[in-house]
Amino acid sequence: MTVREAMRRVDSEEFSWWIAFNMVSPITDDRADLRSAVTAWAAASAMGNKCKVEDFVLEFKTKRRKPDARELMAKFAIVREAINTRACNKQPKGPNHSGH
């Protein structure tokens, strides 16, 4: 689905729910390191090792700031307004449209 399609099909309430869901259960590769750590921990624990998931989490030198929901919603609103404004300013084309 393209961004334009998503803007047409997803309203701001649904988008807010997806943001909240992503904060609880990310479905991107942003935390693939954590999923891999859990897998490694489970394997080690099954073999009798006394360890914690944190023992397997990769440490990165820089930490990215994760935008909060309000910041994302503000950006989404700006994009949506731009698309809506552009759509409202378009005139229908073709022989069957008089433009009135």
Image (spheres, helix red, strand yellow):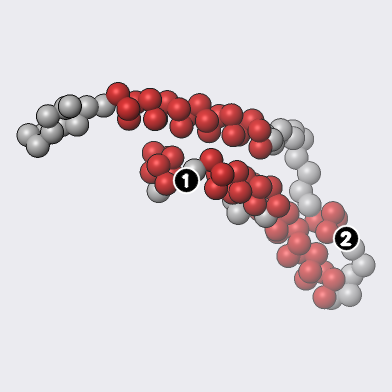
The numbered mark at residue 10 is 1
Q: Quadrant of residue 39?
A: bottom right
Left or right: 86 in relation to 14 = left
Circle 1 packing at 10 Å, graded few (<14), some (14-19), many (20+), is few
Residue 96's place in the image compared with 56, above or below, is: above
Q: Nearer the viewer, residue 81 or 4?
A: 81
Residue 46 on image: x %, y %: 82, 75
- Which amino acid type is shown beneath numbered disc 1? Val
Q: Please count the marks in the image.
A: 2
In the rendered image, the residue lying farthest to the left is 95
Residue 78 on image: x %, y %: 50, 26
Left or right: 13 in relation to 26 = left
Residue 86's place in the image compared with 41, above or below, is: above
- Which amino acid type is shown beneath numbered disc 2? Lys
Left or right: 68 in relation to 72 = right
Q: Quadrant of residue 52?
A: bottom right
Label 2 to label 1: alpha-carbon separation: 40 Å
